[in-house]
Each structure stands twice: as C-alpha cells, then as structure tokens.
Image (cartoon, helix red, strand yellow):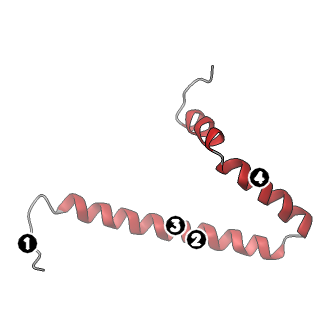
Amino acid sequence: MKFSYNKFHLPGIFSMLKNASLRSANMAIKEQLMQEIESAPDALLAETLNFLRFLKTKETQILLNNVLNGYKLV
C-alpha cells in the first residue's frame, strides 16, 4: 500500500497517535493497580472488587458522566 500525503490522511494519523498515547497511559494505570493489588490484604481486595464492579454498572456510569460533565442531577 502506497502512502500519499494529503490533508485527508492527517486526521487519521493524529487519531492513531492519540489512541496509542491513551493505551500507554492506561497501561501505566493498570501496572500501578497491579502493584497495589499485589501488596493489599485480602479483605481490602474484596472491598476493592465490589467497588470496581459498582463503578462499572451502567447507571453509575451515567451518573458519573453527568457529574463529571457538569450537569445537574434532578
């Protein structure tokens, strides 16, 4: 496949670079979490797992998105 430079390719390139950067940042966060998990007592791990599952629920995500985006909850 031959790559030719034009204005239409640039948004795709920038998007790929941004995605790669986000994946790298996410890996750093996952690595930090894994380090903390390795040194945490079992009781704290159980509580942490429950909290993570809570955060992942759809209703919670909607509420968090609204709060983070500055919307008022009714």
| Residue in view at x 54 percent, y 30 percent | 70
Residue ID for mark 4: 51
Label 1, secondary structure: give it.
loop
Type of residue at label 2? Ala
Residue 4, x across and y down, in percent: 8, 72
Looking at the image, which is closer to me, 53 or 27? Answer: 53
In the rendered view, tell whether residue 51 sits above or below residue 38. Answer: above
Name the disc covering residue 28, or none.
Answer: 2
Q: Residues within 10 Å of mark 3 (few under 14, many from 20)?
A: few
Point out the residue furthest to the top here: 74
Q: Earlier in the sequence, mark 4 or mark 3?
A: 3
Q: Is residue 1 left or right of residue 23?
A: left
Q: Earlier in the sequence, mark 1 or mark 2?
A: 1
Q: Label 4 vs label 3: CA separation? A: 22 Å
Type of residue at label 4? Phe
Type of residue at label 1? Ser
Residue 45, x across and y down, in percent: 83, 65
Q: Is residue 43 left or right of residue 65?
A: right
Label 3, secondary structure: give it.
helix
Residues tagged 3 and 2 counted as in contact (Cβ below 8 A): yes
Q: Is residue 16 left or right of residue 60?
A: left
Residue 22, x across and y down, in percent: 46, 63
Residue ID for mark 3: 25
Q: Label 4 vs label 2: CA separation? A: 21 Å
Q: Earlier in the sequence, mark 1 or mark 3?
A: 1
In the rendered view, tell whether residue 1 sits above or below residue 65. Answer: below
* Residue mark closest to the camera, 1 vs 2: 1
Residue ID for mark 1: 4
Q: Earlier in the sequence, mark 4 or mark 2?
A: 2
